[in-house]
Image (cartoon, grey):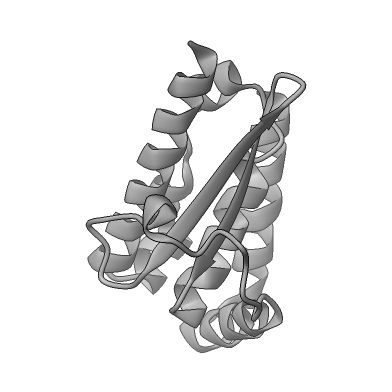
Amino acid sequence: MNSLIHREKKILHIFSTLKSKNNLYKYLIYVGNKINYSPFFLNKNNLLSGCQTKIWLFFFYNKKYLFILSYSDSILIRALTFFLTKIYSNNLPINIINYRSFLFQNKILKYFFSNKRNNALQIIINRIRYKAVKYLI
């Protein structure tokens, strides 16, 4: 569980150093463009429902650890899902289930992102937890 906290704090530190909404958006666009590829898992089975943009999540389980890959047709959401998968991927399912992210209490994210984007992030986290439960059983 410490790795989840450590990863989330690192990401929040990066966001906090950007200081302005404009700098954060530029950084997310930069990161999102770096992830510009066509992954093999773009199919309807991996597509999330309930989001404005298309978001795909792919999960695989290896040696007790859950790994997560993500992609979105929106550059900003692509970057945000990348950061979320950095936090949650390569962890035991029980740690993922028990972890309570503090991303949404963070003033930086509340200030910078609309409720729709924050809702999309919450949908992603919910799907990650759901899959962790499936691999736990």
Residue located at (34% from left, 55% from top): 48
Q: Position of residue 101 (x, y in %)?
A: 48, 37
Residue nearest the observer in this picture, 33 or 48: 48
Residue positioned most to the top: 137
Give the image quarter of residue 70: bottom right
Q: Position of residue 123 (x, y in %)?
A: 32, 49
Compared with 82, 1 (above or below) is above
**Residue 95 in view in this figure:** yes
Residue located at (67% from left, 70% from top): 17
Residue located at (46% from left, 59% from top): 56
Residue nearest the observer in this picture, 40 or 31: 40
Give the image quarter of residue 47: bottom left
**Residue 8 in view in this figure:** no
Image quadrant for the N terminus?
top right
Residue nearest the observer in this picture, 113 or 136: 136
Q: Is residue 32 left or right of residue 121?
A: right
Q: Position of residue 72 (x, y in %)?
A: 47, 70
Compared with 93, 117 (above or below) is below
Residue positioned most to the right: 63
Residue nearest the observer in this picture, 28 or 71: 71
Give the image quarter of residue 91: top right
Q: Is residue 126 left or right of residue 38?
A: left
Please tell me how many numbered marks the rendered image carries.
0
Residue located at (45% from left, 22% from top): 134
